[in-house]
Amino acid sequence: GRHQRKGGAEPLEQKCAGPPGQLHPYDETGRSDKQYTDDTGQGTGLTRCRGEIGLTGTKVRLDGLILQGVGGFYHVEAADAVYICRARGLFRKDKRVPVAGDRVGIAVDGDGTGVIEVLRERRNMLVRPPVANLDLLAVVASVTDPSPNTLVMDKMIALAEINGIEPVIVITKTDLKAPDALEEIYRRAGFAVFVVSAQAPESIEPLRKVLS
């Protein structure tokens, strides 16, 4: 339940391990320098966990990760929640476009919407599809129907390695044709190869562990 402040006591600080921006009642863990008020100007008895970037006015500033961008709106995961954000116009002026995988700083309003204010430095980026900060790239090819295009596979592998991304090979539809020849090519070249089939769900588990 809510902890009540004792008569005459100073407001107490909520030293909470919860998500930044989350509201909590005051407890008895220490003094507070921040008490929030409601629309009438009365104290709410609540304190707010602070994000890594901190609080300014009514906006909560958090560090986050872009999950996807659609039509100028970006889904940003931050502090165990997902916020719908727009990007600052300054990025367009500088010809910088946020993409999935970007680490960003956002300012979130009370209604849960936000603005991307900071784009962190990228470790790497692919143009098509536009994604950033990849650790691993899965190059997927079916063994038949359609037949694998090794030229396209090799281009994707080269692109990954140039950008410091680990490529892994995933061969599908192995219930329709033996993958031995294709598998051998890439294993002998030193790449991790995962052979999977929809008819054998257990074959996906090794790949799942690598992607998790």
Image (spheres, rainbow, N blue to C red):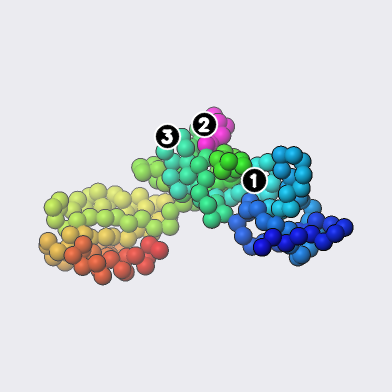
- Confirm whether residue 116 shows in the render: no
Residue visible at 55% across and 31% down in the picture: 89
Numbered circles on residues, count = 3
**Element marked by disc 1:** strand
At horizontal 29% and vertical 55% (from top left) the residue drawn is 139
The 10 Å Cα crowd at callout 1, few under 14, some 14 to 19, many 20 or more, is: many
Q: Which residue is mark 1?
A: 60
Give SS at disc 3: loop
Amino acid identity at mark 1 = Val
In three-dimensional space, the C-alpha distance between marks 1 and 2, rounded to whole angstroms, equals 24 Å
Q: Residue 90 at what x, y percent from top left?
A: 57, 32
Residue 5 position within the rendered picture, expressed as x and y whole percent measured from the top left: 79, 59
Disc number lying in front (1 or 2): 1
Q: Amino acid at mark 2?
A: Arg
Span of residues in magenta? 86-94
Q: Name the one closer to the observer, 24 or 50.
A: 24
Residue at the image point whose x is 56% and y is 34% from the top: 88
Could you give the CA–CA distance between mark 1 and mark 3, rounded to whole angstroms? 24 Å
Residue depicted at 47% across the width and 44% down the height: 75
In the structure shown, which secondary structural element does the residue marked by tag 2 occupy? helix
Return the residue at label 3.
71
Instruction: Identify the mark nearer the N-term, 1 or 2.
Output: 1
Cα–Cα gap, marks 2 and 3: 14 Å
Query: Label 3 near label 2: C-beta < 8 Å?
Result: no
Looking at the image, residue 162 sits to the left or right of residue 31; the answer is left
Q: Residue 190: which quarter of the image?
A: bottom left
Splitting the image into 4 quarters, where does residue 172 fall? bottom left
Task: Name the residue carrying label 2.
Answer: 92
Lateral position of residue 115 relative to residue 8, left or right: left
Q: Position of residue 143 (x, y in %)?
A: 17, 58
